[in-house]
Every structure is written in structure tokens, then in C-alpha cells.
Image (spheres, rainbow, N blue to C red):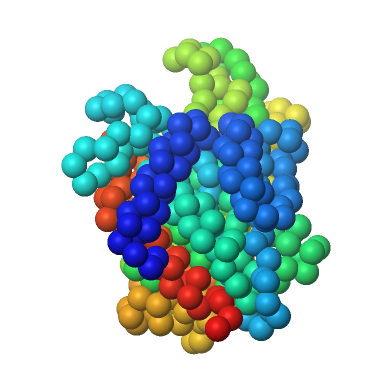
Amino acid sequence: MSTANNSEQLFDNSVKILTDLIGFKTISGEDNSSLIDYCDDILKKLGATSFRTYDDEKKRVNLFATLKAKSSKIKKPIILSGHTDVVPVSKGWSSDPFTATIKGDKLYGRGSCDMKGFIACALAYAPILSKSNLDRDIHFSFTFDEETACQGAPILIEELKKRDIKDGICIIGEPTNMKIIDAHKGCYEYTTYFKGLAGHSSAPHKGVSAVEYASRYVNKLIELREKLKERTPKDSIFDPPHSTLSIGGVFGGIAHNVIADKCHVNWETRPVVKEDAVFLNQELDKYANEVLLPEMKKVFPNASIEKDIIGEIVGFDREDKSDACELISNLTGDNSRQVVSFGTEAGLFQEIGISTVVCGPGSIEQAHKIDEFIVLEELKKCLNLLDGIKNNSVSN
């Protein structure tokens, strides 16, 4: 950004784009195609090539667009990656959550920090990249449904593998206050369904209470949670240092005097290492299939226990040498490395050999909250980083 006027114009454009992006109600699980069209249109006008991948219903879309190198490609490509979905809103907002509102030094709106702020900066900076003599490809990766167990990114990753895009550097622009994040735990989410036999509560021996068996399943989860603590790696860098397990809800029953024939349990685990997730699932499945289910079937042969995988997202592992972290450190002067408790798509890119870092504008403390906001200065910091990436990606 060569002049103060250019910097201000670039910042103003990022605010305008962020305002537009917030206006798209891209709640997880809902259609995000209008936002993707908006992003694709901006990039295609700059000469980018792109492709899309979809969910089974063709209503949720991933976009992968590329500004190709103009000189001989001597450097690894860089992926600027962000998710387009946002979490639902609850009552209590001071303003319309899907209308960007600036108050003082903050811009309010759902997704302002998590993470449409980064996408806005990438799109605002794209015209500068398109006019530069790039010696590496710059990719823009915008995914759907990260907030619900990263359902969109695995579909994109499979397409990247088919196209042999398995090298380079990926910057995941999740809100980190522009700090360098190089590790986080995995995130495995499940729903387990119990099917029993309804009946009158005065004759419980003639029915199979799905709620009761679900309760025993929950007790087993709690027991296994303590086992996970015993498996804590000695060199764990996380807080807490062990794999965690959380029960999100138990849902079943229709009345006091009716034996519940249906119940389901929502639960998740965040493993420090993948082996913990394997251990947990093996122990839990053994208990369900060898203890609970035979008891249920004695009364009702058609009883069932089924576990649905909502998402199994691998962790993001710290590496001794990371091209992505080194790049950001060289551009920002920040040599620190941090870990976070929340999950991202970083491990999915890392798993196919792409050096990855999580670094973006905004604070995770504002994510998912009423009156979510991003401090406007964070957008400027992000634009400065993108300016550094451009300078590192042009031939002299």
C-alpha cells in the first residue's frame, strides 16, 4: 500500500465488502450460494479462474478461485482460506445482526469477526494482487458449514487432491487478533439415537425406555471422560492438557406416564491425539453393542442404537518447521506461537501436505455472541499482512 490515500481507500473497500457479506444470512446448514456468487463475481472480474464443490443438495457451496502467477512460478502457492457460514442469532441484539453497524471503532454484525472480516480483506486486496507480477499462484478458498463440524471443507479437500493441489502455504483467517496459531485439538461430533418400545408407565417391564438406556450411555461417556484424563500426553501443549468430552444434550420422552420409545444424545470429543478418539469410540461402541443393545432386544427385538457421525475433524498439529508460520513471522516480526481451544479447518489442509497457519483479524472472544463485532483496526492489520504477502509474491 504505497500511499496513505491508497491505504485508506483499501480500508474503506474492505469495510464496504464486509458490510455486503454480513448482509448475506449464511447460517450454517442454509443456502450460501448468493454469497459465493458475490465473491466469485469479484474475483472473476479480476481474471481469476475458479471451481465450485457442493453438498448433496447442491445448495451449499465451496469456492476455490485462483489468481495465477504471471512470471515463472518459483514459489509455492498461497491459499487464503475462510468459511462463509455463521452461527444462528439469538434475541437481545442492539441492532439488526445482518446489517453492519459501525459504532466508534467497532463494526457490529453476525460474522463480522468470525470470519467474514478476513474474507472481506482478501477480496478487497485481490485487485492489487491481480495487477502484480506474481511469481506464485494465490488461491482463495471459501467454504460452507465450518461451524457444524467442518462439513464443507472435506468436500473441497477431496477435489484439491484430484487436481493435485497438495502443496503450498495456507492461511486460515480465523479471528486470532492477528496472532500466529500453530496447533489445536481435533473436534469429533456425534448424535447417538436410541429406539425402544413405548408403553404405559405402570408396566415398565413391557416396554423399553429409550431414555433410560440413553442415560446409561451418558454415564458411560462420563466414565470414559475420566479415562481420557489418564491418557494425557506428557508433552501436551494444550489447556486442558488432555482430550475432552462434552455432552451437549439428551432429548426424549413425551409425557410422565409414557415409556419413551425414542431418545437421542448429542456429544462431542476434542482429542489431543487421534488415538484418543479411536479409543473412546471403540469402548463406547463395545458397551452399546455388547451390554445395552442385548438387554433392549430381550424385550423388543427391533430395538436399536445408532451413532451418527456429524463430523470428525482432525486436529492441527504443531510442526518443528512450518513454512506457513515462518512466512507470517517474517512479515509481522512476531516469532511467538500459540494454541487455541477452538477448532478450525487447518488440520484438513495440513493432512494433505499443505503447510498451514491460523491467523486472522478479530477476537475469538466476540465470536458467536450477541452484538458480535470486529475492531476496525484489525482489518487494517490484516490488510498490512496481505500487503506483505504481495511483496513476498512478486518478481523484482
Q: Position of residue 252 (x, y in %)?
A: 52, 25
Foreground pick, 384 / 165 = 384
Q: Residue at left 78%, top 69%?
A: 164
Residue 268 in view (yes/no): no
Foreground pick, 198 / 189 = 189
Foreground pick, 125 / 21 = 125
Residue 131: image quadrant is bottom right
Q: Residue at left 35%, top 76%?
A: 332
Q: Position of residue 271 (x, y in %)?
A: 50, 64
In the image, taking residue 202 as reference, residue 194 lies left or right, namely right
- Give the number of marks: 0
Q: Position of residue 69 (x, y in %)?
A: 67, 71
In the image, taking residue 203 as reference, residue 101 lies left or right, namely left
Q: Residue at left 51%, top 52%?
A: 123
Q: Is residue 275 above or below residue 58?
A: below
The single residue placed furthest to the left in the displayed view is 104
Q: Is residue 236 above or below residue 54?
A: below
Residue 132 in view (yes/no): yes
Quadrant of the rendering where the C terminus is positioned: bottom right
Q: Is residue 270 above or below residue 242?
A: above
The single residue placed furthest to the right in the displayed view is 162
Q: Position of residue 276 (x, y in %)?
A: 54, 66
Quadrant of the rendering where the N terminus is positioned: bottom left
Q: Residue at left 50%, top 78%?
A: 392
Q: Is residue 155 above or below residue 231?
A: above
